[in-house]
Image (spheres, helix red, strand yellow):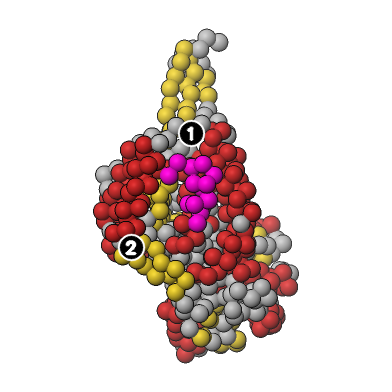
Amino acid sequence: MRVFDEAMRINGERRRRSSVIEVFDPFSSRCVGTVPRAAVADVREAIEVAAAYRPRLSRYERSEILGRAAAEVVARTREIAELITMESGLSIRDSLYEAGRVRDVLLFGSRAALTDDGEIFSCDITPHGRQRRVYTQRSPLLGVITAITPFNHPMNQVAHKVVPSIATNNRMVLKPSEKVPLSALLFADILYDAGLPPPMFQVVTGDPSEIALELLTHRSVELVTFTGGVSVGKQIAQVAGYRRMVLELGGNDPLIVMDDADLEEAASLAVSGSYKNSGQRCTAVKRILAHASIADDLVHRIVTRTRAWRFGDPTDPSVEMGTVIDERAAMLFESRVSAAAAQGAKLLVGNDRDGALYSPTVIDHVQPDMELVREETFGPVSPVIRFADLDEAIRIANGTAFGLSSAVCTNRLDVITRLVDELHVGTVNVREVPGYRLELTPFGGIKDSGLGYKEGVLEAMKSFTTLKTYSLPWPT
């Protein structure tokens, strides 16, 4: 209990001496809460508390903690969803869905914690072999993990960092986005109530310009895991130095619609993939690549569905889409769409803005070199790019700096095979949105979307451990 008490004492001192950061509801612009504005000294203390603690939880104990937390998330789903909506502007529908995903992460982590992750190799399988066996086991890191999460999934992004850390008996210090810190703090409370020793997971809230360097360079930090924008990710890679990094960065994900596609299905995927979570997902549909022979019909269906997509007050259960994260983001989407229209693209619906509320938008005849689709436009925009054949579609899809995910609507196996082989991405989904996955399955990208390391519960657990081998005499 000494380390537990010390962690609680330090947290209390942090709250007393820190200034605060205000958290605003993007829809009403109302301040909905405050969190401590941590200083470098606060971050240093959190890391040192974590570094001094040595977790001794058994697999069973870790599994039980995560399982109890999952049950608590289910019991408090409405409360969690309302908090996510309040600080992020996401519709209550999207927030309820996110709470369900958090529950899944916890359950997958609970099960994975029970699985023996070792392997056995017999050594008498070559002429030079011996009568021995080599065994492997995964061990927690010697140092501390620091995690930095973005605003777009306020609790689920946090869960994807923290749950694998707990499942592998590690210690983590998390800095959530200063725009949506309340969900992370609630998640920490849920885990503490479930029995997690606080030194295994601490949350520091603050301005990244003030505290990020300490999170990245403290001598006890062994691994940095970051989800967010490309420019920040590359800065982290430059600053962090000789330590492990898992960087999950942006995406510019295409939905490729071939001439044999079911256009009703394709239009449905295009719209949901573009507008769910207010388009604020790294795996959202960012570009709709339409075969020229079906493009007019497809665009008509997308426009019809977009006009019916309800947006507005995120607390209204009938609303499908709330705001984006803030007015500045909405202004960026508005300016990029307007610039594309000025360059010859055809705005068909949307591009209306009221503060952080930005309407679902369809713009056709977009060219691949326009900023709207060359860069990641992280909002509810459906840009349509037309192509003549599969070769052109592949060139366009691969023609950005990103390589996260993709999707294709077709029934032709030869097309599917070529796209799986030739698209420079981490994921290809057939007749689904680019973002489809389970919380368990590997997830991640290449190029400016990441270094090729995968997230998802099992892959993150591998990243958060060290593989050790040992051998023993073993007669045949």
Q: Position of residue 364 (x, y in %)?
A: 58, 83
Q: Look at label 2 and name its amino acid.
A: Arg
Q: Which mark is residue 57?
A: 1
Q: Position of residue 291 (x, y in %)?
A: 63, 74
In the image, is residue 167 above or below residue 209? Answer: above
Q: Residue furthest top?
A: 475
Location of residue 336 by image quarter = bottom left
- Taking the spot 41% from the left edge, 67% from the top edge, the residue there is 34
Q: Main secondary structure of the magenta part?
A: helix
Give the alpha-carbon distance from disc 2 to disc 1, as whole Å.
32 Å
Q: Earlier in the sequence, mark 2 or mark 1?
A: 2
Which residue was labeled with disc 2?
A: 37
- Taking the spot 34% from the left edge, 58% from the top edge, the residue there is 15
Residue toward you, 366 or 249: 249
Q: Is residue 147 left or right of residue 436?
A: left
- Taking the spot 33% from the left edge, 63% from the top edge, the residue there is 37
Q: Position of residue 69 (x, y in %)?
A: 57, 47
Q: Look at label 1 and name its amino acid.
A: Leu
**Residues packed near mark 2 inside 10 Å, few (<14), some (14 to 19) or many (20 plus):** many
| Quadrant (top left/top right/bottom left/bottom right) for the C terminus | top right
In the image, is residue 351 above or below residue 67? Answer: below
Q: Which residues are magenta?
A: 186-198
- Per the image, is 123 magenta? no
Q: Position of residue 265 (x, y in %)?
A: 72, 69
The answer to whether residue 291 is visible is: no
The answer to whether residue 36 is visible is: yes
Q: Is residue 147 left or right of residue 299?
A: left
In the image, is residue 388 above or below residue 463? Answer: below
- Taking the spot 44% from the left edge, 32% from the top edge, the residue there is 56
Is label 2 in a helix, a strand or a loop?
strand
- Per the image, is 193 magenta? yes
